[in-house]
Image (cartoon, rainbow, N blue to C red):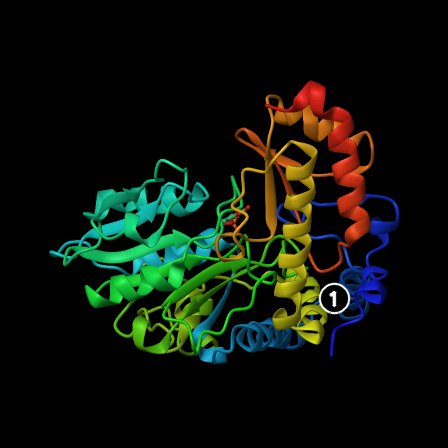
Amino acid sequence: MTPDFAALRRLFPILSRKTYLNSGSYAALADPVEAAFHAYLACRQQHGAAWDQWVMKNEAVRGQMARLLNASADEVAITASASAGINALASSIDFSGPRNTVVISDWEFPTNAQIWYAQERRGARVARAMPDAQGLIGPEAFAPLIDESTAIVAITQVCYLNGARLDVEAVAEMAHARGAKVMVDAYQAVGARHWDMAASKVDFLAGGMLKYLLGTAGIGFLYARTEAMAGLIPTQTGWFAQADIGAMDSTGNHPAPSARRFEAGTPPVPSTYAAEAGLELLLSIGTEAIQPRIEALTGQCMDRLAAMGWPAATPRDDARRGPTVAVPSRDPAGLVAALAARDIVTSWRAGNIRASFHFYNDESDIERFVAALADLKAAYAP
Ligand SMILES: Cc1ncc(COP(=O)(O)O)c(C=O)c1O
């Protein structure tokens, strides 16, 4: 049954005031997420500290992430950010032997490049897959880079600059054939596209809750496949990563057998409230229904832009696109400001503005966005 997207849209009050095309920066705030923040404050007023309840909240979020990804809760670490999860994973990899290369792409969000370059001090070498003459990165770009020296291929699912999507499953197959592991930075798509870790070949998946997962800043996740994390002991750790948190044992490091070993300190309590509410809403709709809705909206937006004579920089092929439509401009900051003056919320990176879509957007948002761009074309088109 198709979800009632018109009714769901009404859960996001900002949508009655703004054309909100900025979920790739931060999700629109849903009523139940706002209520969850209030519930946290009410809990503080009532109990002061409610650690038992708060630890359970963190576990609830872990369970929800496991459901969303079709994984086991033991394969999910709840982290303070995507960076925190990637760092913990990187710290667990031994770069002192012959498998010391990390393969990234030219489309990485800075954090998923910087963290791997930081491992050069620990013996890592970083190789970078570059775009072809059309500006695209296909699986073939990785073929010459992945070999017996590759420890891990750490790549983004969707590029934050241009909205293009990598064929991460094809890359994962290639990496596994050469004995390497694969981590995907799914931040620009998780919640907007369906993930099924039981069917996927990806070993590790990192992301956070503030964009398409409808939650808030301050909380992220790292999925770690049971077989892939065997033998990996993070050196970036803390008391919440221990096998028995309650043991309070300061005489050694005893990492959890589960993905919890990639966690560190006190859970982000206020953020767990919001993340739980956001994930509950998302799971009630289902990413199987959300993905085609977003594909249709972004496709329609791109067709309208092309017809208007200002084509997007994002690939039109559904197989190569995420939830963001990137539009080139000679003055992207100026264009974002001009759109904001018309109550149209977008963002910009490098030479593009980004219109990112979630299930709560509809055709009326596309109409207003395209009409505004048609108006602004003379001043801002490339
Ligand atoms: C693809 C991608 N990775 C990582 C991040 C940042 O993650 P965090 O700040 O949670 O470490 C972002 C934020 O926009 C992103 O778009």
Identity of the residue drawn at 53% across and 46% down: 163
On the image, which quarter does residue 241 sit in?
A: bottom left
Q: Is residue 227 above or below residue 127?
A: below
Q: Quadrant of the C terminus?
A: top right
Q: Residue furthest left?
A: 98
Front-most of residues 105 and 39 = 105
Q: Is residue 378 above or below residue 27?
A: above
Q: Is residue 224 above or below residue 162?
A: below
Identity of the residue drawn at 79% across and 43% down: 367
Identity of the residue drawn at 38% across and 67% down: 202
Give the structural element (helix, strand or loop) at label 1: loop
Task: Pinpoint residue 183: horizontal percent, then vertical percent.
Answer: 37, 60
- From the image, tell me which residue sits under label 1: 48
Task: Pinpoint residue 89: horizontal percent, then vertical percent.
Answer: 35, 60
- Viewed as shown, does residue 378 lie left or right of 238? right
On the image, which quarter does residue 269 sit in?
A: bottom right
Identity of the residue drawn at 70% across and 25% down: 377
Residue 72: tell me if it is visible.
Answer: yes
Mark 1 residue CB less than 8 A from any atom of ligand 1: no
Task: Pinpoint residue 324: horizontal percent, then vertical percent.
Answer: 60, 47
Front-most of residues 151 and 145 = 145
Q: Is residue 159 above or below residue 196?
A: above
Amino acid at the residue labelled 1: Gly
Residue 237: tell me if it is visible.
Answer: no
Front-most of residues 302 and 9 = 302
Number of numbered markers: 1
Q: Quadrant of the N terminus?
A: bottom right
- Viewed as shown, does residue 128 lie left or right of 279? left
Q: Residue furthest top?
A: 379
